[in-house]
Image: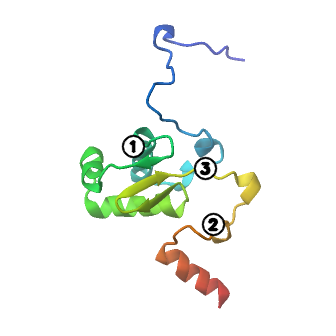
Amino acid sequence: MVEKHPICPQRVRKVPKQFSWIDQRLVRERHIDRLSHGASALYLFLVTVADAKGISYYSDRTIGKRLSMDAHILATVRGELVENRLIAYKHPLYQVLAVEDHRRHGSGGLDRRHPSEPMLIKQIFTQIAKGA
């Protein structure tokens, strides 16, 4: 068994005064496995800049410049994060959402959506197709 100890003890990280965190369940429950590199980059940016409620006021233009993404790519990766229920977006605001507990919700998709949450058009058509 490997003994765990800091490699650089003088640089052990501490919780900063500003608020930011990444939930370990993103990896443990394999949420991150469903994301493209671009969506992962956007998620990292948003969790870094979001306030304690997960809200980010950064404009798409600024995010695109910081992440070297054009408007189309940004919209695509944002859609991935919305579809995977990791963020909510209502122009001009982003909200990083609490990571859902798979043990509580199972692996289903649309049935996990809270009625007040917006749906992507793709989700609406998928739901219609399932009902037909």
Query: Amino acid under label 3?
Result: Val
Q: Is residue 126 left or right of residue 112?
A: left
Which residue is depicted at the point 54% across and 60% down? Answer: 84
Mark 1 surroundings within 10 Å by alpha-carbon count, few (fewer than 14), some (14 through 19), many (20 or more): some
Mark 2 surroundings within 10 Å by alpha-carbon count, few (fewer than 14), some (14 through 19), many (20 or more): few
Where residue 45 appears, as percent x and y from the top left, is 39, 43
Element class at badge 3 = loop
Of the image marks 1 and 2, the number of the one nearer the N terminus: 1
Where residue 30 appears, as percent x and y from the top left, is 62, 49
Classify 103 as above or below 72.
Answer: above
Where residue 62 appears, as percent x and y from the top left, is 25, 49
Q: CA distance from mark 2 to mark 3?
A: 14 Å
Q: Which residue is mark 3?
A: 99
Q: Identify the residue at the far top of this view.
A: 10
Query: Amino acid under label 1?
Result: Phe
Q: Identify the residue at the far bottom of this view.
A: 132
Quadrant of residue 74 in the image? bottom left
Q: CA distance from mark 1 to mark 2?
A: 25 Å
Q: How was the colour assigned to the protein in this rendering?
A: rainbow
Where residue 39 appears, as percent x and y from the top left, is 43, 53
Of the image marks 1 and 3, the number of the one nearer the N terminus: 1
Classify 54 as above or below 128.
Answer: above
Residue 9 is tagged as none
Q: Which residue is mark 2?
A: 114
Q: Which residue is mark 1?
A: 45
Element class at badge 2 = loop
Circle 2 or circle 3, nearest the eye: 2
Which residue is depicted at the point 63% across and 43% down? Answer: 25
Element class at badge 1 = helix
Query: Amino acid under label 2?
Result: His
Q: CA distance from mark 1 to mark 3?
A: 16 Å
